[in-house]
Image: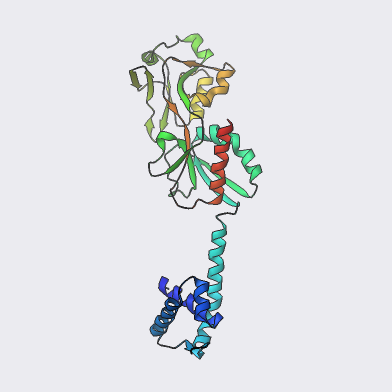
Amino acid sequence: MKGGEFTALNAFVAVAERRNFARAAAHLGVTPPTISQTIRALEQRLGLRLLNRTTRSVSLTDAGERLLARIRPAITEIGAAVEEVKELRDTLTGTLRLNVSSVAAEIVLAPVTRAFLAAYPAITLDVTVDDGVSETAGGRFDAGIRVGRRVARDMQIARVSAPSRVIAIASAEYLKHHSTPRVPQDLQQHNCIRLRNANQLIVWEFARGRNRIEMSVNGTLIVNRMELMVRAVLDGIGIGYTLESHVAAHIAHGRVVPLLTDWSGGVHSYYLYYSGRRHLPAPLKVFLAFLRAHLARA
């Protein structure tokens, strides 16, 4: 059925039920001449008269009666289905599918999950942890959480974490047996734990004043998950490179030591990103508001 045919049949049902063009037009939000023209065009396409018109009344022909009996249930069902879908905009139920990096899962998602589910018990969070580059629409995800520089430009974004420095770290045990690096170039003499992301090794960056250095470090361990890098640092295998907020607890308890603190590895934040559609699903809308409120309190 073409869109115009549905419009015409819907107009026919409106007139047939009300036996009046003016009242049917008011119900559909169009003018009486428009609905009259629509019915006339429908009759011409069918080659049948559906309505008998006089100056005072409108009645159904035999063909009109038969057509109304067949299509009214379908029109009613379609209308109910449309209204049901519209209600989802404001119904706080459903499933919210998220694609997040492993670090975002720990820094952004884990601290708020319990409180969010308690506040919205009818919403189901379906979380996929993926450190690769993932498309939200193509992967059937409602939104993702990534560090800002890895978010596609055509996405809508909202910052959901405080800015954090990127730093080099080592365990106290490792530093007992190896000299402490004083400048980034000293890292070339150390066993650095390298991180692979999207099949590329992450370049270590440092800056101090106008001096900027990008380094491809060396080491005997390459991983593709940040938590594996941190675990290796804790085990004394070598030097790692990560967000300070990701290892803040380990630093506070003395399990790892920040290195090259007078050099900056850059500052990054995590962002919730989603396609720029006009109407957000209700679960995503309240989740975004919840993350923003949590960030404001933090």
**How many numbered dots are placed on residues in this image?**
0
Left or right? Give the position of 17 relative to 139: right
- State how the image is colored: rainbow
Above or below for 274 versus 20: above
Above or below for 120 versus 222: below
Above or below for 112 versus 189: below
Please state the horizontal and vertical placement of residue 259, each as a whole percent of the image: 46, 15
Name the image quarter holding the C terminus.
Answer: top right
Left or right? Give the position of 109 relative to 2: right
- 61 or 141, nearer to the observer: 61
Name the image quarter holding the N terminus.
Answer: bottom left
From where the camera sits, is residue 2 visible? no
From where the camera sits, is residue 193 visible? yes
- 125 or 153, nearer to the observer: 153
Please state the horizontal and vertical placement of residue 5, each as a whole percent of the image: 42, 75
Residue drawn at 38 percent across, 23 percent down: 205
Quadrant of the rendered image containing residue 208 = top left
Above or below for 139 versus 39: above
Please state the horizontal and vertical placement of residue 55, each as a whole percent of the image: 48, 88
- 191 or 90, nearer to the observer: 90
In the picture as drawn, the residue positioned furthest to the front comes out as 55
Please state the horizontal and vertical placement of residue 114, each as a whole percent of the image: 64, 39
